[in-house]
Amino acid sequence: MSAHISVIGAGYLGATHAACMAELGHEVLGVDVDAEKVAVLSTGQVSFYEPGLQDLLSRHVASGRLRFTTSVAEAGAFADVHFLCVGTPQRHGGYAADLRPLEGALNELARHLTRPALVVGKSTVPVGTAERLSARLGELAPVGLGVDLAWNPEFLREGNAVADTLRPDRLVAGVQSPRAEQMLREVYASPLAEGVPFVVTDLATAELTKVAANSFVAMKVSFINAMAELCEVTGADVVTLADAIGYDPRIGRRHLNAGLGFGGGCLPKDIRAFMARAGELGVDQALTFLREVDAINMRRRHRMVDLAREECDGDVLGKRVGVLGAAFKPRSDDVRDSPALNVAAQLQLQGAHVTVYDPRANANAQRLFPTLQYAGDVAGAVRDADLVLHLTEWDEFRNLDPEVVGDLVAKRRMLDGRNALDPDRWRAAGWSYRALGRP
């Protein structure tokens, strides 16, 4: 059954959700206050890299099933279901989430509703936000119109967001009425017909599901990185350790990859906002372990800089360093809180001549760190380098020939910040190979 859907906020989450809703057969109107962004999307183009999204978006814009506008009034008159996909960044000067853009979007939408509707939050928010927004919606929407609010958190992984939307591992719906549940079931009829679990809960549980899941993933990543710290002083191998404990079904191998740790625009700010909210609720002790999770994650970046100094005989001043990777993860051009760029910038501040190459993220990295040098390929990044750092695990880097790269550098010294290269292969080619948590 086709529905008329609006998606408020056309950034990474919103553009992806809008295109995927059109793919599921719905008529979709994307809304954003940024006229330039709307103009680009209206041509069927997307300004960021996400595998599969460009084809999806251009196809449905061309068919007319997906449109974009700056008019919230148009959305209010068009849609039966409105998804709120507005960002909730970390507030300046603190850990808490900045909810002002989200609140502003809901206020504006409520004033322009002209037909019965379901407003669905997808943004990551502190627990209790949905209940407050529901009350606000009731105050602002026309009396007797029939407007409800639900919360349907997103669980997208950058680099896999299209599949995560069309074929999610679960759908969570925080609802306040049978009507809201039924409308969401109709929106997601296709994935539900394929057997995707549909978890129906209250608003608070739906909000907590998102931040709890993110916190658990962050904890797992930081746990194996804490083990890497122990491996480095004992001579143990963290990769083999992860394999060994990963066979335990209570633990599992996913997210046990030691290295530079997590970054991006979601996980770091989400766990910090979660801690801040726990403090507001008077239960901050329940989440004090997340402070250490965050601290472990940041220590890995400093450790990589320390290793770079060690490899350069104690000082990187004047050394040429080639950095492979700028995005916070492969299959993305997102450089927000990127561990790779953080390490590159620290080395530059210590006097190294740093050249960075990323298959997708060079332009974004250059806007964020314009003082670093950038190359258009691996050869340009590593030519005459005294040290090479592998910091984002793109397949292009995994498949490099150590002999070919060795002919370009001044010294065959590799630091693998992602434990993704084959140590034996690189050492056989005459490279000094070191990685976090490995002998």
Image (cartoon, rainbow, N blue to C red):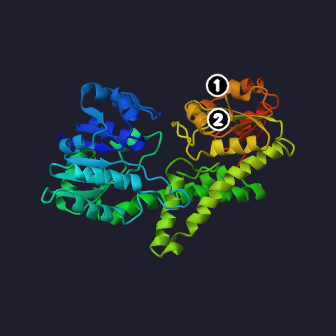
Sequence-wise first label, 2 or 1: 2
Residue located beneath label 1 in the image:
377
Residue at 20 percent across and 44 percent down: it is 79
Position of residue 243 measured from the top left corner of the image (x, y, whole percent): 60, 51
Secondary structure beneath label 1: loop
Residue at 61 percent across and 38 percent down: it is 326
Residue at 55 percent across and 31 percent down: it is 360
Position of residue 290 measured from the top left corner of the image (x, y, whole percent): 56, 64
Q: Nearer the viewer, residue 418 or 346?
A: 346
Left of 343 or right of it: where is 248?
left
Position of residue 115 measured from the top left corner of the image (x, y, whole percent): 15, 49
Position of residue 136 measured from the top left corner of the image (x, y, whole percent): 28, 62
Measure how far apart labels 2 and 1 are at the Cα level. 18 Å
Q: Nearer the viewer, residue 326 or 318?
A: 318
In the rendering, which numbered label is found on residue 428?
A: none
Residue located beneath label 2 in the image:
370
Left of 62 or right of it: where is 381?
right
Q: Quarter of the image holding residue 389? A: top right
Vertical comparison of 22 with 226: above or below: above
Residue type highlighted by circle 2? Pro
